[in-house]
Image (tube, rainbow, N blue to C red):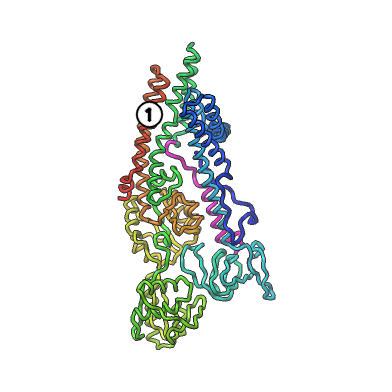
Amino acid sequence: MNTSTLAPPSSGRGTLPREGTAPRRTRVLALPEARWALAALVLFLAALSLHLAGAPAWTWGPLYALTYGAGGWEPGWAGLLALRDKVLDVDLLMVVAALGAAAIGQAMDGALLIVIFATSGALEALATARTADSVRGLLDLAPVTATRLTAAGEGERVAVEALNVGDTILVRPGERLGADGRVLDGASDVDQATITGEPLPVAKAEGDEVFAGTLNGTGVLRVRVGRDTSDSVIARIVRMVEEASGTKAPTQLFIEKVEQRYSLGMVAATLAVFLVPLAFGAALTGSLLRAMTFMIVASPCAVVLATMPPLLSAIANAGRHGVLVKSAVVMERLGETDAVALDKTGTLTEGIPRLTDIRPLAGSGLDETELLTLAAAAEHPSEHPLARAVVEAARDRGLALPDAQEFTSAPGVGITATVGGRDITAGAPARLLDGARADDALSARAAAVARELEYGGRTAVVVTVDDVPAGLLGIADRLRADAGATVSALTDLVGSAPVLVTGDNPRAAARLAAEAGIDDVRAALLPEHKVAAVRELQESGRKVLFVGDGVNDAPALAAAHTGIAMGRAGSDLALETADAVIVRDELRTVPSVIALSRRARRLVVQNLVIAGVFIAALVAWDLIGTLPLPLGVAGHEGSTVVVGLNGLRLLRESAWQRAAG
């Protein structure tokens, strides 16, 4: 089937779903391709039932004819239009072959071929439409309106399209930012996962850059608009996905790469088989029968069907093991991978902050258990991801947490609470240590531990008791248990270690990469930088597999030779843009599906050899001698059965186990 490109985006935001509503999803039957495919299937099943029941031909014959019309008119018409550009489309050839089968009494076989191609076209159209829906829905991450401050300092609600560079907007707690810009006043924690993919909110204060579509925490921010809303980072993500999907080179199955020459040669040969004998006085009926027999035995249908069973079997086997591969083209393309790029958060890591270090300070009088108990009790009322990590760690250790009183939270600084009559604070070392009542030596030790934790890629949280530094906690995203084995398997499989591309800071990225066995680390990347990294690899002649999960990964998923999304935490856009989805969130299935694809490609080559031998033998028989039509059909169908059974070997559990190594 011809590869469709992503439908162009709507020209205005007015056609997009508004804030707070889900993006509209394309219904299957809203697509004409799906309606025609369904009609063809229903007609075929009705005709087949009557045919197999021994009903008169006049009952099932018209139903077969309607099947040909419903499922074949659209690809047939598109093929005729392609002929004007001197292109012989494979869909047109399949329609002609189906009609040829009907002409020599094989109406059921031809109708089945029509139904298969119509269904394939409908699935492709649905996938394309849903990708377009997700791309348009992405713009809903940015709000439709924003609060703009007037010269008098009063707030007015305006459409984000009306914002100009230099305007000042007010962003209240829990609101999404309406534009890219810099903070003029205020402090807050901003969730930037849609842009960077990182799970921890980032503290923002005066002078810090913020992005449209990101979610403000509990503080109030005044932001000066720095970019036109049409050029915001989130808008650029939309454009990059559309451009990458639309300009990605059309992909074809192996056999389709020689489709044009083979098809033209077969058509010319069929005409020659029909016309040359007529020129020498042969009977019309005999010449037509020989030509029809030749067209059947030489038809590329057998070769195309010889290609599909191994790929479809591999798709089914991968699906049973939690990997959804969206098409046979993708399954074949996965085996071509010779370079891998991995996102960090949610892909190489679990994507959930975990407590990694408990470091009580000497002289504080607290041990690890007491320090964690006080910190978790104080953090318990907070909804911040760092607080949840601390509380979860205390629960895992079975600690009983006393009640916290007088809880307060300062955005970008930390929390304060009274626990057991003691004033407890927990927050950023840079903000809390300066105000702590302690001798210089104790503060210096706390600062040194904080630097050590941060240098190791962890987020440091200082805990003070009655304004005296008592200890520090280290929090970090945790490497997946199978990350190291996956990186090693990918290195052996493709011949080079994966590249880590992430929006996280270089220290944290380097630490995780070292644990996983990755040397090439590219950190602090925005979505456009991830696309640039993928394209840099591809421009060197590599076929890159990109594995990611978030909205910020969608452009790279679209730009890569093949993209795989992690399903459990993956965004809608990433799941729709990717060529394959790891449904069970098991990273180790990535090398397994690549190995399975390579085995499928080897079986495709075997099947093509088998099909080629059958076709050559039958064609030679028809041209040199007299090949009876039933025997020609039997030989043609027999070759299809043989290669089909050969391809079905990949359905076995042992095929996956062998791929998993």
Q: Left or right: where does residue 406 sit relative to residue 145? A: left
Residue 359 horizontal/vertical position (percent): 35, 78
| Quadrant in the rendering for residue 569 | bottom left
Q: Is the magenta stretch mostly helix, strand or loop?
A: helix
Residue at point 53% right, 45% down? 126
- Asked if residue 244 is among those painted magenta in the image, a careful observer would answer yes
The location of residue 560, given as percent across then percent down, is: 46, 51
User: Amino acid under label 1?
Assistant: Gly
Q: What stretch is highlighted in magenta?
A: 227-255
Determine whether, in the image, residue 136 is placed left or right of residue 388: right
Seen in the picture, residue 226 relative to 642 is either above or below; the reply is: below
Give the crowd class for mark 1: few <14, some 14-19, many >=20 residues within 10 Å. Answer: some
Residue 441 showing in the rendered view: yes
Residue 67 found in image quarter? top right
| Marker count (numbered) | 1
Using the image as rendered, state which of residue 339 and residue 111 is in the foreground: 111
* Residue 278 falls within the magenta-colored stretch: no
Residue found at the far right of this picture: 152
Above or below: residue 339 compared with residue 178: above
Query: Is residue 590 found left or right of 158 in the rendered image?
Result: left
**180 in relation to 472, above or below:** above
Q: Where is residue 471 in the image (x, y as percent from the top left)?
A: 38, 80
Residue depicted at 48% across the width and 79% down the height: 415
With respect to residue 473, does 292 lie above or below?
A: above
Residue 575 locus on image (x, y percent): 48, 53
Residue picked out by circle 1 = 638
What element does badge 1 sit on? helix
Q: Can residue 86 be seen in this view?
A: no
Q: Nearer the viewer, residue 41 or 391?
A: 41
